[in-house]
Image: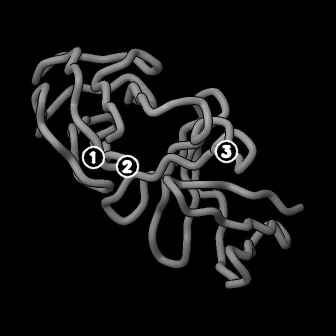
């Protein structure tokens, strides 16, 4: 089974070879289901959460939002405004931006904590923070916009 996923402007071809091997852009990787929402990738654990057409993956201290390539293409063409939200119920540990701040792709905008993990939420593209709708220490729910980022 092969699927195409995107993270930001990068596309990935994922081929599920069997229950213990996946191929990402042609590179074979050993995997196994560890427990609910967790997968062993080599000697490390990755956690996954699905929200709508996206799958959030927390791996090696980084957070990736993967969407099917078709959905990513629709997102890229529908406008230049993003509302970033939590992938699961989480607590806001640190706000790294305020309205009016300019950010680059990959900059950490907010750090959430869920399931005893810190989840940095990064900018998918360069832009300006147009709104921050949360505060440190607040419990936030999935799908609720936390930070609005306008491209440009």
Residue 141 sits above or below residue 128 on the image = above
* Label placed on residue 125: 2
In depth, the one of 21 and 143 nearer the eye is: 143
> Percent x, y for residue 33?
65, 58
Mark 2 Cα shell of 10 Å, populated few (<14), some (14-19), many (≥20): some
> Percent x, y for residue 98?
10, 29
Along the polypeptide, which appears first: circle 3 or circle 1?
3
In depth, the one of 145 and 34 nearer the eye is: 145
Residue 97 sits above or below residue 46 on the image = above
* Label placed on residue 73: 3
Q: Looking at the rendering, which quadrant does residue 28 occupy?
A: bottom right
> Percent x, y for residue 61?
31, 60
Q: Secondary structure at mark 2?
A: loop
Look at 37% across and 18% down and name the residue there.
145
In depth, the one of 62 and 102 nearer the eye is: 102
Distance CA(mark 3)–CA(mark 1): 24 Å
Quadrant of the image containing the N terminus? bottom right
Reading the image, the residue beneath label 1 is 120
Mark 3 Cα shell of 10 Å, populated few (<14), some (14-19), many (≥20): few
Along the polypeptide, which appears first: circle 2 or circle 1?
1
């Amino acid at each position: 089974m092969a699927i195409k996923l995107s993270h930001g402007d990068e596309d990935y071809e994922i081929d599920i070879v069997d229950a213990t091997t996946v191929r990402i852009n042609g590179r074979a990787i050993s995997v196994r289901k560890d427990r609910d929402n967790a997968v062993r990738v080599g000697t490390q654990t990755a956690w996954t959460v699905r929200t709508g057409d996206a799958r959030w993956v927390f791996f090696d201290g980084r957070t990736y939002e993967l969407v099917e390539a078709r959905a990513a293409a629709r997102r890229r063409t529908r406008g230049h405004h993003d509302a970033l939200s939590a992938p699961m119920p989480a607590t806001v540990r640190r706000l790294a931006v305020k309205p009016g701040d300019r950010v680059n792709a990959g900059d950490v905008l907010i750090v959430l904590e869920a399931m005893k993990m810190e989840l940095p939420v990064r900018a998918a593209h360069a832009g300006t923070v147009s709104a921050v709708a949360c505060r440190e220490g607040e419990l936030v729910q999935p799908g609720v916009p936390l930070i609005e980022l306008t491209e440009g």
